[in-house]
Image (spheres, rainbow, N blue to C red):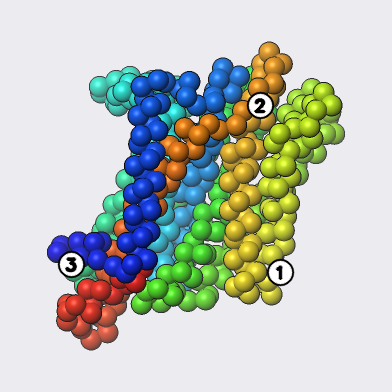
Amino acid sequence: MKVIFQIIFKGSLAYYLWVLFLLACIIQGLFSYASQFTDGLIVTHMRDSVSWGYYIGNFTFLVGVAASAVMLVIPAYVYNWKPIKEVVVFGELLAVAAIVMCLLFVLVDMGRPERLWHMIPGIGDPNFPSSLMAWDALVLNAYLMVNVVVVVYLLWSAYQGKHYNPRIVIPLVILSIPLAVGIHTVTAFLYSGMASRPYWNASILAPRFLASALCSGPAVLLILFQVLRKISPFEIKDDAIHKIAELMAYAMGFNLFLFGAEIFKEYYSNTHHLVHYEYLFFGLDGKPSPIAVYGWLSLIFSVVAFLIFLIPATRKNFITMNIGAFLIYVSVYVEKGIALIIPGYTPDTLGQIYAYTPSMAELRVACAIFGTGFLIFTLMVRVAIYLLFRQEAKSGGGIAEDAATVEAGSSI
């Protein structure tokens, strides 16, 4: 394991600067959270009218990023498609980092995090199976454990220079598919089960969550794969990247279709529930909405990105593909944060309008959580690249574990 620590603690100047930046993000966020822990959630801009805010918006988005690993798992293990199979481990690493960030966002959103023990079976009373929160905790932790076990086993096999045992891996990755669907479905049920919030109270919300999730996570992977093959010896074929982009086109098309169906239902029926979409895109009582620009931005970015990924010429051109991936990431991030949370609470059940914006404390704490997730992902990717490259080199005839081999991928 000495080699693994060398891979983690040795690298280029760019690597050290990146890690220091992430550590700085984490440290400053810890100071901000210390203030929140002492003074309470009053340091945030959440109030009775808007009791879910930036934290839960990020949680919802990251659940989708974690679930998106299924986009690689299905073609890799179910259909045994080799180009995807060679890079599927990175999707699972992204899922692990995303779930860790999800759990951290839930933790900081709790007013009394020391009472988390109430959710532990046998010690507390999670109110299972009646509570949807208990179901959410169950599927999130189960999905995290499955991905951790698969990743650790695959990398351990690579460290030993052996091929993994399909009898161990295949059942676990097959199990991860319904769990991936389950984590975003249960999260959607947390919203849609609220009868007093008609903006969320729609059966179509769960498939919308899943469709958008199958766009946002792969958008990250498309950029990551291109970076990895430039700064590491790990080969990632164009076929794998192009196949992910093609699957994203289908997912984004389905997402836009579901959104259009919801818009038609609200505007054609023209009930008082339309007020939430009016606030999102236009405004109320003759006053412009402070979030309208974000609503339109998310919609326009989604349509443009869908067209980019739908047309083969632009989908296979790396410049336009990267632009499309960026647009998808931003559009889904805005959709799961601003466009999902705030209109659901505006107006509130008493008809009042509270213009919520994240406080600096919320932004700083969120920065720390993202820094933690990116740091975990960075370290895991460095180790994975080294071990997978080492296994590939050994299978090609064997190599000595000298300094050059240890530093393989150290330019990351």
Residue identified by numbered label 3: 3
Q: Earlier in the sequence, mark 3 or mark 1?
A: 3
- State the image coordinates of residue 390 (x, y, percent, origin top left): 25, 75
Residue positioned 32% across, 45% down in the render: 145
Mark 2 element type? loop
Q: Amino acid at mark 1?
A: Ile
Q: Nearer the viewer, mark 3 or mark 2?
A: 2
> CA separation, marks 3 and 2?
53 Å
Q: Amino acid at mark 3?
A: Val
Residue identified by numbered label 2: 355
- Labels in figure, total: 3
Relative vertical location of residue 253 with respect to residue 382 in this rendering, above or below: above
Residue positioned 37% across, 74% down in the render: 232
Looking at this view, is 177 or 49 the one in front?
Answer: 49
Q: Nearer the viewer, mark 3 or mark 1?
A: 3
Q: Amino acid at mark 2?
A: Ala
**Residue 284: quarter of image:** top right
Residue identified by numbered label 1: 311
As drawn, the label of residue 394 is none
Looking at this view, is 65 or 21 the one in front?
Answer: 21
Dot 3 and dot 1 residues touching (CB under 8 Å): no
Q: Earlier in the sequence, mark 2 or mark 1?
A: 1
CA neighbours of label 2 inside 10 A, class few (<14), some (14 to 19), many (20+): some
